[in-house]
Every structure is written in C-alpha cells, then in structure tokens.
Amino acid sequence: MKYSKQRELILTTVRKNLIHPTADQVYSIIRKTMPNISLGTVYRNLNLLAENGDIIKISLPNQSDRFDGTLEPHYHMICNKCNKVFDIKLDNLKGLSDDIFKNYQFSVENFDLIINGTCCECKQSQ
Amino acid sequence: MKYSKQRELILTTVRKNLIHPTADQVYSIIRKTMPNISLGTVYRNLNLLAENGDIIKISLPNQSDRFDGTLEPHYHMICNKCNKVFDIKLDNLKGLSDDIFKNYQFSVENFDLIINGTCCECKQSQ
DNA sequence: AAGATAATAGTAATCATTACTATTTAGTTT
DNA sequence: AAACTAAATAGTAATGATTACTATTATCTT
C-alpha cells in the first residue's frame, strides 16, 4: 500500500470532523484545500480505511453511509429531525452474541444497532 | 384507499413467502400469475402496506430492502454466506429506550438491530 | 535515473428506488 | 345501468449513491 496525500487528508478529515460525515461531505471539505480530488478517490479510500480499521463505516437505512473516526466500540443514534448522528455507549448488549448462539446456533460476526428518535436539542426547540 | 387486485396479491405474497423477499422477488413471484404487473406498483404497495402496518420493511445496509409478513415484534439476522434473513426473538433489549433517555436525553422512536453472521446450515456445510 | 506498480482524476456505468403521465379501474351518484 | 370522480396502474424516465473503468500521475525500489 503506497502512501498518498489524498488518503492522508481523507483520514485526518474524518478524524477531525466529528459530524460523522458522508463521503460527499468529506469530498466537499477536502476540495477546499485540494480542489481537484476525485469523488471516486474519496469513496475508495474511505472504504479502504474502514477495511483497515482506521475508521468505522456506519450504514444507515435509506441514507448515505457515514464515517466515524472514533474507534472505541459504541453505537449510533440518528435524530429524525436534524439528521445528526450521535455516539452512544451501551452495556445492555453484552452477551447478546452468546445468547443468540445458544438459542439459534447462529454465529454472530457483528451486529449493528441503529437508534432512531429525536435528539435533546431538537426536542427543546419544538 | 381503493381495493386493487395487485395490492391484494402483493400482501398475500409477502405473507405466504417466508423468505423475507425483496421488492424484486415479490415482482418475480407475482409475474407468474399476473404477467404485466409493474415493478413500480410492487414498490408503491409494499411501502403502503408497510406504512399501514400490514407488513414490515427491513432495511439492510448495502442491500435491497426486504419485506416481512410476520407482525409480532422481532429482530433479524442475516447470514453472510447464503444471504438468508432469519427472524429472532430477543429479550435483552427491553428497557433500552429508557436507558438511552436517562443517559442521553434522546427520545427513542424505534431501533433496529441487524445481526450479521453465519447461519447454522452454512456453518455445517463448510 | 529507470522501472514497476499502486493511486489518482475524470468519466461512465450500475442498481435500487422513486417520479411522472396517460390510461384504466373501483367505487359512488344519478 | 350510465356517468362521474378519484385512486391505482403500466410503462417509462429520472434520481442518487456508489462502483467500475482507463489513461495518466505519483510513489517506491533497485
């Protein structure tokens, strides 16, 4: 894997911008300092970095994927008013994989919990 | 809401076929008995029926949506080998919404748990 | 410095889903 | 039962996110 300025910028952009940006948002941000970066390059590297474990890819139903530079295990809430994504830590799910194996003989590789609702701020401004 | 033969067929198809079919699969099945039904009609009615609570729409990351005629609350596991979707009942998640509200002041509307792994059958045939 | 190969920019293609529109159908009114 | 109205359909076009393709450029190695 060869170094590229583009990949480095993509990584630091996801790490710095805590908004859980989409590929398109990363593209917009980077274009300010590197105007002719290609959207395909952004997609390719975001996926590469996610496979590499340098960032996390958040797949949301019927929305663009988002990317997260926070690596500690956590889940995500998405506000259905402002569409922002929030990090959330939960202990409830410990042992879930084992329970499922016991009851269903299904080997859990990973699971995704996407929580939908209204965030604190949006609730107050209603 | 007016009756249509198409909508009725779409509903019974999802109820009968327990494979959690995609819109395209529903379309293929129905075309055998109603050859000139339109794919748009299938999509429109699947969404209508889901909004109506007659069926459940399962949104999976980077895959076509699936539809489920089983209405009792449950979650879904998807096998990364055969791509089949399985129903699963879990008690672990009771109280999750309240916990989240307590810790994050986020009003949970709904949450989706998508479990990824290898199903019993695929594991044995490896 | 030259050669090999990975990465890029820019564009085209893909795929699931939705939008659009003229026509048909269901349900209602006379 | 014919006429009317509004919802639903078939068929096609459009959308939007993402991936594929290809000629060119950049990185790394000898």
Image (tube, coloured by chain):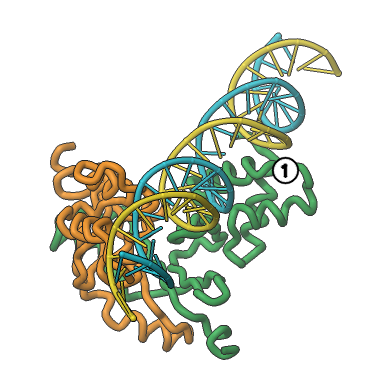
Chain colours: A orange, B green, C cyan, D yellow
Type of amino acid under label 1:
Ile
Tell me if C29 is positioned left or right of D25 in this view: right
Locate the N terminus of chain B and report the quarter of the image it occupies.
Answer: top right
Between A53 and A88, which is closer to the camera in this rendering? A53
Quarter of the rendering containing residue B126: bottom right
Between D15 and A123, which is closer to the camera in this rendering? D15
In the displayed structure, D11 sits above or below A114; it is: above
Quarter of the rendering containing residue A88: bottom left
Question: What residue appears at the point 44 percent right and 85 percent down from the top-left corner?
Answer: A103
In the displayed structure, C24 sits above or below B107; it is: above
Tell me if A97 is positioned left or right of B13 in this view: left
Question: What residue appears at the point 62 percent right and 41 percent down from the top-left corner?
Answer: B40
For the residue carrying disc 1, how many other residues have a C-alpha within 10 Å: few (<14), some (14-19), or many (20+)?
some
For label 1, the residue is B37
> Element at badge 1?
loop
Between B33 and C4, which is closer to the camera in this rendering? C4
Question: What residue appears at the point 36 percent right and 72 percent down from the top-left corner?
Answer: A111
* Residue A36 horizontal/vertical position (percent): 30, 43
Question: What residue appears at the point 39 percent right and 51 percent down from the top-left corner?
Answer: A40
In the displayed structure, B121 sits above or below A23; it is: below
* Residue D12 horizontal/vertical position (percent): 68, 33
Number of marks in picture: 1
* Residue A21 horizontal/vertical position (percent): 26, 51
* Residue C3 horizontal/vertical position (percent): 42, 70
In the displayed structure, A3 sits above or below A41; it is: below
What's the chain of the residue with tag 1? B
Tell me if A36 is positioned left or right of C24 in this view: left
Tell me if A116 is positioned left or right of B126 in this view: left
